[in-house]
Amino acid sequence: MAEKSNYLKPEYFYNRELSWISFNYRVLSEAQDKERPLFDRMSFLAITASNLDEFFMIRVASLKDMVQVNYTKKDIAGMTPAEQLAAISGKTHQLVKDQYNIYNYEVIPNLVNNGLKIISYYEDLNGEQSKYVDEFFQSEVFPVLTPMAVDSSRPFPLIRNKTLNIGAVIKIKPGNDTGENTQFRELYMSHYNKKKHGDDTDNIDFATVQVPSVLPRFVEIPSSTGIQKTFILLEQIIEKNIEKLFINYEVLSAFPYRIMRNADLDIEEDEAADLLMEIERQLKKRQWGQAIRLEVEDGIDKRLLKTLKNELQVNEEDIFKINGPLDLTFLSKFDKIEGFENLRKKNYTPQPAKYLKGSGNLFEQIREHDILLHHPYETFEPVVNFVRQAAKDPDVLAIKQTLYRVSSNSPIIASLAAAAENGKQVTVLVELKARFDEENNIIWARKLEQAGCHVIYGLVGLKTHSKITLVVRKEEDGIRRYVHLGTGNYNDSTAKIYTDMGLLTCQKAIGSDATAVFNMLSGYSEPAVWNKLAIAPIWLRDRFISLIKRETEFAKEGKKAFIKAKMNSLCDQGIIAALYEASAAGVKTDLVVRGICCLKTGMPGISENITVRSIVGNFLEHSRIFYFHNNGFEEVFMGSADWMPRNLDKRVEILFPVEDEELKQEVIHILDIQLTDNTKARIMQPDGSYIIPNTAPGTQKICAQEYFCKEAIKASNKEKKKQNNVTPCFEPLTGEPEEN
């Protein structure tokens, strides 16, 4: 058995970034699943492309920054930033190859087999299609484009982050034109030839044009026999007609390219007098950060590639040569094509909440008992109604809420604004540092301020990631506090595709803690004692460690000890070391970790009692649930925090208990079903790979997400049947009948 001091050895941990790549491979495997409808597979392929973009813009960019300043500190797996970049480069290049193998050899043939075709090269167009494309270019595309030639008098333009562009090698035509309106050309040619000084006899230059994002990426064109619908990509339309953009030039070659830039905001919060203005300034810079990845079409002109490489200052390992169309995120749009129902998955309709009876007064029901919510299997509407009813209720005095990410047309924002206009005290903490949602949150924050809400723009040095709403209501027996606590964002759109849990309660202890949370956020005042809630970065880490160590002590005493937990990511060294110590003592630990996992399983004497599984399905697993056996006195917690250093040390997070016995058993049931998933779950192996669970012949197939869908529908139908079977009770009139 390993000594306690040895649980922190680098060889006991996986690198965070490489673990993330492993996760994206699990997403990619869904694109390979032949049992999935084709459009669904294409969406998963698009997701891997989007994930990879963000990975480069944030994680790879951060590592490059470290290397540039000679930062050599090793991570928990013992890798320097330079070593991580080298490993990432090899694995991401392979990942991209695998993506395009699926696109070229599975997606494209299957589309054709189902009556759909994507024209890969404009040279493959027939006569009718070619004419249609040219006319479309002239009428719809040409007016939007801004062609830019680069020569000694016109510098290389700033290429925006994530934009798709077409680069061209061009050569100015001899000045033998006898046509009209050539004065500008002749004038330019005279200056051009002087500037060349005879150094380049070929007069070869570079030109570029951005593929406009305001136009559809793929355009339907006339189909040939046997095909129902045919599409061509917008960049192919532009390539075919590119000489029309550079009339005075001969276009020698043209190829698409795309770049990723460093999009990680660099904010010195201690020196930022106005955080809102500083973030707005940084958002503008995000488009022009250092180029960290260059995507080009395979077979690109060497002269063109050399120009791009030099001007963008990218290294050879940062260049990705793509065998197919750049930026596969467009594949998710195919699901919007009308018809072809056999190619898309059936949409699931969220069911009414199991522990709610009808859509009446929420406050009355919460007073009777705590209410557990399970999204998206159950509708998010109770959360929306909680704020909406509070905004309209004359007895509600105050509403306080934290917002991290919200939808573009949020009903919750509308209700908060209405509440303020109705004279209620409304306090909203809007986290401006929510990555890639900063601009959206700034807009909402200003609208809330205009409506009369008191808006807090986050905290210096910390992100507020907690999900909490407090409603203060005046009732006959005094002031009562109603609280919603959740694992996911107050976003009615993502609530349809993210799996999350929520709790509605009016427990006095939780209400008191909720008030303390908002006082802490608005005035930095911390209570002497917390009752039920554990708060990061104050003491949440210590709370988790103490709960794990308690199970360790029970195991050492020969008692049953068990930990079950579900989260998005696990990469905190201290938590992992505590789990290793627990495992070595005999604590059985079953983990569901969707994404990054730096813990290693199956190490003799260290992690033999730990299992890790990842579930990737139709919904994005997002809930955080923690179970501790506690010598038979089971404890269940939910919250907003993963087991990551950023969640425990650099964010405001909340962990809350589920104490109602019925609700506690329901949460345990949810965990147990996920731990029995043998369809979409992948089990981590000692070498870090993930495999489909081994099942004996005849074993029942269990897909946790499908199970919860069916369970929610069954519960809803049962409630409907119960209501329909209620015998109406007729009472005699006690007064004079009303006149018609």
Image (cartoon, helix red, strand yellow):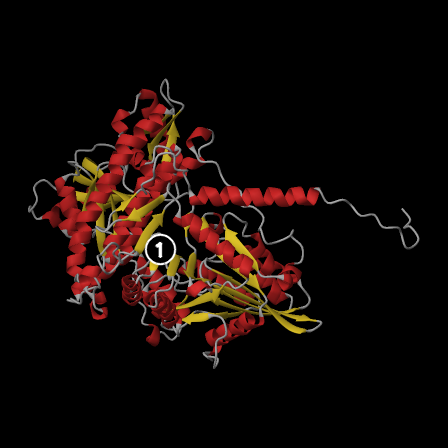
* Number of residue marks: 1
The x and y percentages for residue 563 are 38, 60
The x and y percentages for residue 330 are 35, 40
Report the front residue among 156 and 119.
119
Report the front residue among 58 and 250.
58
Q: Residue at x 53, y 70 (%)?
A: 510
Q: Quadrant of residue 561?
A: bottom left
The x and y percentages for residue 324 are 25, 36
Q: Quadrant of residue 120?
A: top left
Instruction: Name the residue tied to disc 1.
Output: 591
Q: Is residue 10 left or right of residue 391?
A: left
The x and y percentages for residue 14 are 23, 57
Q: Quadrant of residue 433?
A: bottom left
Q: Is residue 368 left or right of residue 628?
A: right
Q: Residue furthest top?
A: 225
Q: Is residue 417 left or right of residue 308?
A: right
Is residue 465 among the parts visible in the rendering? no
Q: Residue furthest bottom?
A: 528
Report the front residue among 427 and 627.
627
Category of crowding for the residue at label 1, using alpha-carbon neighbours closer than 10 angstroms: few (below 14), some (14–19), many (at least 20): many
- The relative height of residue 480 versus residue 193 in the rendered view (above or below) is below
Quarter of the N terminus within the rendering: bottom left
